[in-house]
Amino acid sequence: MAQIIVQRPEALVVLLLLWLLLVWRAWPRRFKPFGPFAVRLILLALLAGAVAQPEYWPPASLAESETERTVVLVDQSASLGAAGQARLRTEAERLASTLGNPVTLFFGDRPVALPLTQATDATAFFQPEQSNLAEALVLGGELLAGQPGRLVLLSDGAATTGEAAAVAAQLGEQGVAVDVLLDRSLEVPEVRLLQLDAPPVLRQGEPAALEIVIDSPAAAELPLRVSRNGEDGLETVLAEGPVRLEPGLNQFSYDIEAGQPGLYSFWAEIEAGPEDLAVNNRLGAVSRVYPPPEIMIVSENQSAGSQLAGRLQQTGFETRRIGPEQLPDRLPELEPYDGIVLLDVSARSLALEQMLALQTFSRELGRGLVVTGGRNSFSLGNYADTPLAELLPLDLEPPPREERPPVAMLLIVDHSGSMVQNPGPDGATKLAMAKEAAIRAASSLGPEDLLGVLMFDEEYEWIVPFQPVSGGADLLNIEQAIATIPAGGGTRIYQALEVSLPALMARQTGTITRHAVLFTDGRSFDQGKELADYEQLIDTARQAGVTLSTIAIGHDADELLLQQLAEAGRGRYHFAATPEALPELTISESDILQSEAVQAGEFEATQRAPHPMLRGLDVEAWPALGGYIAMTPKPRAEIPLQVGPEDPLLAVWGYGLGRVAAWSADTGQEWAAADWPEAGRFWGQVVGYTLPAPELAAGLQLQIELTPAGVAIFTADSLTAAGLPVDLAPTEAVLTTPEGKKVAVSLRQIGPGRYQQQVQLSTPGPYRLSVSQGELTATTGFALPYPAEYGLSAGAERLREIAAASGGETFGPGQTPGGKPSPAEESRSNEVVRLWPWLLQAALVLWPLEIAWRRWARLRIQ
């Protein structure tokens, strides 16, 4: 229904008063002359009507005006400070007078609808130490109840929780725009101490580092003080003096060394300007120091084991070095140790029972295990299909390469008479299967690879001198030469190696990987040749980068000698009980060439992700590696360090209750630098990370959870020696605050053997908690950071995102949002008719008529 709406109805009251005045003055003359008197009444009515500003509203426009609403959201969180909070309250009052008394929401950790008369008391209704812009926007949108309207946000843009931009986008989809105040006076430049990190657990004598992060709005030089307090209450100043700050985040590191066992608290403080908030210029942290852990180092190389033991001892570990044969295979003998290091240990040197004991040591006892690389480890140490392979965070197979370096492969084939004796069930002889295996190996090579084939019995002959495997006719000629190998006489292995290995060593141009495979079914008849002679021959080849694998065919082969030759040649040993197994074994050898495990060259280690094992270490300053063993990460593995084409260098994962780490290089024997400044600290942190957290007390363990609202949840789990829960036991605690005040806390049972209590904390800093249950006591510490609200800076960019995502506008202090009319407002303004101009024009027409009539009446009277 159409209506006439009067914008200034008080003008009509004035009209009534003027009419009464006019009647009172005309009454003595009995309203004569009456005509001019009536016109004068009409003229006053027209003028008063024009001043009242009446408007004609059609039905549709009236409905839009009645349903449009405005909700003003006023931030009162602590990051604004008292001055900023007051400024936004003043801005809200100004908007209320210009926007027609909108709904006003004040918010901190949650929004609350309050009248402006209670604005100064708004923080009593929520937690100002948090700001939840998203929830305020959600409630503001709900108050519009699906009707047309707008939200007006008054905030500094700092938010501790919620995704405000996502909520704003949803509001925009619903047709609700959010207009945002941009007030540069709220962006107070402030220096903030953002982070103080100390290792929560340290071992006596272990070196560590305190990490400090300071956010500065501009370049400055400010005093920084770092201190430590022990259980005796004595303070030790670790660093004190001015530090140079650049705009943005500034990181500082201070080396510390764990002292006597006990609980230690750390403080970092900066002295900033008087306009800065004091609460975010101080941070605390807590570390607990435990007695040194016991580490067993298993190493075949006494020198390497002693070197690592010395490094660990310098960082606070107690060590014992043993050989692989001394590794216990019973858990009671391993239980005293916190961790074990396998230092380039071959699986051939360990019995199955020893490997199974290592599995249980980590999986069920929760102890640490570190496995390092070398020529006897991982794939080179026959870890495949052993319990060691299951323990590792890495798969032994190298990752596939799109391209691999060219290789030179040497096949040394025994064609003695015994190779054609005792054929298999299908009539295939050992020699026939060996020739098939050699042909398959040849076909797996590429055009840039070299192949040489030497057949031997008591004599030797190069049936395929070293040549490229270029495919086509060349490959066919190679296969025909191999296929025509005849049966011969006796077996002279040393002579074959003595001739063929130097030939392979000479193939250096354009080749990186050189590998030899020896197949034989018998024993060598080389006169006067001992194992030492073989080892000297193979060692010369190894120094030239040649590896050797051996394949024993049948039970008549000299298995012991062939195992020793493969081990000396840093290759693989295979046993083929039947001739049929030969082709697959040779293919596995050519697979080595397709994705070479040992990567040789010069490689720089790079940090893939931040990790506690690398805390305080400058990886970029480490010396280059000369090689490593390429492996593939398992799905759950963490990879702090990588090398080469993003291959894992350092990997770790959780295995049962324990942790297992793998280092794919050696510790300084061939690939890694023998000594470098950070070596001791690095190995101390790697081994230390795998170790279990020391027990807080026998049968009583504590956990502490801190909520964003500053509530600490204390949980104590009490178990008997047999692992059974202890129920209905009085459990008391004493909480020592950062000021040294002691507060008694009673923990109530919430489950089998579990006791818990919640405490609201108010003072940021280190706390000490001591829990007692009968004769059992446990002590731990924690640090309460200052509320996250004080660590935030004004988020002008976030405010612009909110406005843009919702289709709203930004406006400055003193301005009114919505200055640009919306399409609906423009349409409405075209429909609404303003009547006051017409009334004013009618009054201007009647005014001269009234004057003329009044004068004409006077002339008639005269």
Image: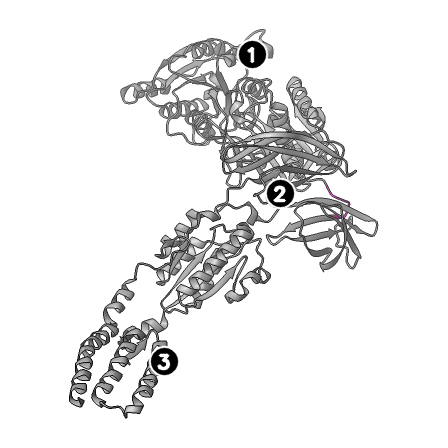
Q: Which residues are magenta?
A: 695-700
CB-based contact (under 8 Å), mark 1 and mark 2? no
Of 352 and 110, the residue lying toward us: 110
Q: Nearer the viewer, mark 3 or mark 1?
A: 3
* Residue 828, image x, y percentages: 27, 69
Marks 3 and 1, the one that precedes in the sequence: 3
Q: Nearer the viewer, mark 2 or mark 3?
A: 3
Asked if the stretch drawn in magenta spans residue 370, the answer is no
Q: Tag 3: Cα neighbours inside 10 Å, few (<14), some, or many (≥20)? A: few
Q: Nearer the viewer, mark 1 or mark 2?
A: 2
Measured in 3D between alpha carbons, the distance from the residue under mark 3 to the one under mark 1, in whole angstroms, is 123 Å
Q: How many marks?
A: 3
* Residue 479, image x, y percentages: 34, 21
Q: Report if residue 862 is visible in the image.
A: yes
Secondary structure of the magenta portion, mostly? loop
Of 824 and 361, the residue lying toward us: 824
What residue did someone put label 2 on? 656
* Residue 93, image x, y percentages: 46, 62
What residue did someone put label 3 on? 13
Of 111 and 624, the residue lying toward us: 111
Q: Say the numbered circle drawn on residue 620.
A: none
Amino acid carrying mark 1 in the image: Tyr
Marks 1 and 2, the one that precedes in the sequence: 1
CB-based contact (under 8 Å), mark 2 and mark 3? no
Residue at left 48%, top 58%?
90
Disc 2 is placed on an element classified as loop
Measured in 3D between alpha carbons, the distance from the residue under mark 1 to the one under mark 2, in whole angstroms, is 44 Å
Q: Residue furthest bottom?
A: 30
Is 56 situated above or below 715?
below
